[in-house]
């Protein structure tokens, strides 16, 4: 790779000062038309890239926002990003995306990479592994907006946009109870992530409010994936006291649960199933999947609005807000025990 | 937003030269330990961000790669990105992603954004709108690697990694013929994109090789989405001479086709359906969807390998290669006319 042309190279080639080159390229009126023309021609000849980076180094504004998500393969995160882009494009901000792939090490690299790319701010949803969040402090230290969404950590005194996950867990469970299910199991992740803990709390509260027992054997801690759903459902359905419904940690896990139930001829809705996230496929599988809509588009829109507010303030962290969105139950066939 | 601290601020605060600050921060041995310590402490006090950008400006190496895709909501592109990341991580390269959302204007902005973010190279798959590809010339001009994958344009003399799309169209059609279907329709995009044109050519060639007529009314030009699939299938099934099978431009379109066929009680495989891309949902819908696997993971791996080769050369465009991958038919229920 050849060395990048700088304004120093142009100055040297024309035997003029760097400052003259800089002012000529910025269109200062004090520069003669002849000089301006000579500089522009030499810049082209030397393949000088007149990007906004040099001025960005001064003003700290590139109009690029970085978004860190666990994975864009989850429709939920892809939708949020889409709505962030939509909400920012009229203001001239563009979005670059970094995936943590659920690894805290990747997430740390993501913060570094995006800051090195001179982004004006970062929005992030934490990886399943993330406990210590000190790698995000550098963003705050640089006085750039940081917004956490969906998977957040309250140690960082930054704005957050979340779903009411306690309510989401409660509503999923209450929906199954309303449909006539009584022995309701719960498949979740072993990772200590607030949103998953809150959903579990909501599940327990709904059972207790309906005077149903909270059974330890009904709570399966594992991973969240199609494979994990199959495994969890298999284990739960081998219990002596089999559950008659399963709340799955996300729609991929719920899909695995449904596959397993079909294999052992306990086809939903005989055994009820509900997931979280309303993924793209959820309406199309058989039986189609009841789920909790997490309002990705609203979450994305709120992220964009919050960023524009923060960037307009001298101190972006003045009046830090925490926005909590309400979940919605999407009723489909997989939980339709009652004749619908 | 406050102004970014520079080495000029540190120099001023300590009343020393900028060069001393720079050398102190870079660990030059000629600088005394006392000065080095003073500089580092002042840098910390003033929140100086010792990023790699300044040195990147000199060497042109940030170890960041930009990937431009139409949308990460398509599993195919998300999978490719995942494998690009995988193939580059041992070499210390990190990936940032930009979505064109099928708009050429966004794509132009993407190239600008990524170059401003000082990426070391760009990999891109073109938007459906892209005809003129001159916005990519700037990357080549900067002597940075540009690789096109899947949706490419031969006007740019850059390495490409593609599927044999003629063969993909041919195989999809031949598969339906082998299953016993004879009146095979084709739903594709109105956009003049090479991969879609090649698939159409493959479809026509397979029909001709099997002595079946190529009927204009069987080729529907529209969009590619669930909605477009429903619309196209509706139109095709209202023809006097109804098709008995449909090749859909991608799996989302095929999903729309299946939905429409179910509504009008022409449940596949009575009418055969095959898609392209083997999306995440394709194995789980009812009937599950036959499709053409485009080998996203291999495409991603080849992109990574190609980039590492290019970046190691003085001229990245020396010996430009064009890698063509072979498609595979994934046989499932939606095309199972024959007893399987």
Image (cartoon, coloured by chain):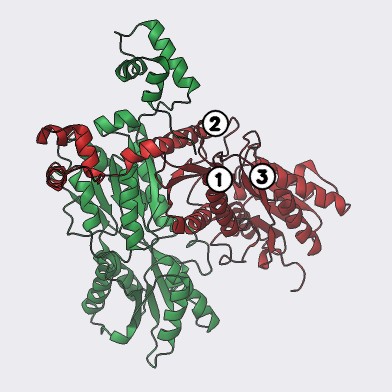
Chain colours: A green, B red
Residue A154 appears at what percent x and percent y? 18, 59
Q: Nearer the viewer, mark 3 or mark 1?
A: 1
> Of the residues under marks 3 and 1, which one precedes in the sequence?
3
Q: Nearer the viewer, mark 3 or mark 2?
A: 2
User: Which residue is drawn at the image coordinates 39% and 77% (left, top)?
Assistant: A246
User: Which residue is drawn at the image coordinates 64% and 39% (left, top)?
Assistant: B193
Report the label total: 3
Instruction: Name the disc covering residue B137, or none.
Output: 2
User: Which residue is drawn at the image coordinates 56% and 38% (left, top)?
Assistant: B315
Residue B139 appears at what percent x and percent y? 50, 34
Residue B77 appears at what percent x and percent y? 53, 52
Q: Can the viewer see residue A17?
A: yes
User: Residue A171 occupies which quadrant of the picture?
Assistant: bottom left
User: Residue A8 occupies which quadrant of the picture?
Assistant: top left
- Kindly identify which residue carries mark 3: B195
| A167 to the left or right of A225 | left
Instruction: Name the disc covering residue B287, or none.
Output: none
Q: Residues within 10 Å of mark 3 (few under 14, many from 20)?
A: many
In the structure shown, which secondary structural element does the residue marked by tag 3 occupy? helix
Q: Is residue A283 above or below residue B73?
A: below
Q: Is residue A110 above or below residue B57?
A: below
* Whether labels 3 and 2 share one chain: yes
Q: Nearer the viewer, residue A4 or A289?
A: A4
> Quick one: which residue is furthest to the front in this view?
B30
> Of the residues under marks 1 and 2, which one precedes in the sequence?
2
| A89 to the left or right of B335 | left
* Whether labels 3 and 1 share one chain: yes
User: Which residue is drawn at the image coordinates 60% and 60% (left, top)?
Assistant: B278
- Kindly identify which residue carries mark 1: B310
Q: Nearer the viewer, mark 1 or mark 2?
A: 1
């Amino acid at each position: 790779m050849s060395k990048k042309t700088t304004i120093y190279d142009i100055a040297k080639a024309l035997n003029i000062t760097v400052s003259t080159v800089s002012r000529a390229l910025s269109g200062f009126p004090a520069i003669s038309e002849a000089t301006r023309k000579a500089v522009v021609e030499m810049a082209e000849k030397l393949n000088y890239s007149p990007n906004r980076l040099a001025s960005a180094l001064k003003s700290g504004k590139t109009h690029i926002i970085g978004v860190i998500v666990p994975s864009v393969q989850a429709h939920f995160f892809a939708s949020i990003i889409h709505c962030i882009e939509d909400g920012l494009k009229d203001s001239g901000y563009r979005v670059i995306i970094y995936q943590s792939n659920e690894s805290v090490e990747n997430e740390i690299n993501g913060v570094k990479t995006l800051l090195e790319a001179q982004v004006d701010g970062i929005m992030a949803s934490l990886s399943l592994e993330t406990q210590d969040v000190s790698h995000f402090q550098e963003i705050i230290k640089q006085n750039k907006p940081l917004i956490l969404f969906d998977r957040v950590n309250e140690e960082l005194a930054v704005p957050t946009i979340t779903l009411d996950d306690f309510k989401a867990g409660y509503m999923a469970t209450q929906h199954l109870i309303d449909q006539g299910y009584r022995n309701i199991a719960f498949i979740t992740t072993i990772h200590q992530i607030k949103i998953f803990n809150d959903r579990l709390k909501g599940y327990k509260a709904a059972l207790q409010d309906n005077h149903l027992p909270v059974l330890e054997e009904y709570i399966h801690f594992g991973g969240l994936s199609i494979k994990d759903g199959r495994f969890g459902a298999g284990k739960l359905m081998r219990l002596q006291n089999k559950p008659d419904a399963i709340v799955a940690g996300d729609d991929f896990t719920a899909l695995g649960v449904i596959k397993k139930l079909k294999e052992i001829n306990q086809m939903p809705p005989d055994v009820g199933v509900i997931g979280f996230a309303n993924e793209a496929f959820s309406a199309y599988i058989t039986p189609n999947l009841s789920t909790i809509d997490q309002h990705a588009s609203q979450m994305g829109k709120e992220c964009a609005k919050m960023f524009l507010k923060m960037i307009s303030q001298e101190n972006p962290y003045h009046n830090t807000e925490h926005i909590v969105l309400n979940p919605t139950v999407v009723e489909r066939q997989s939980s339709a025990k009652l004749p619908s």
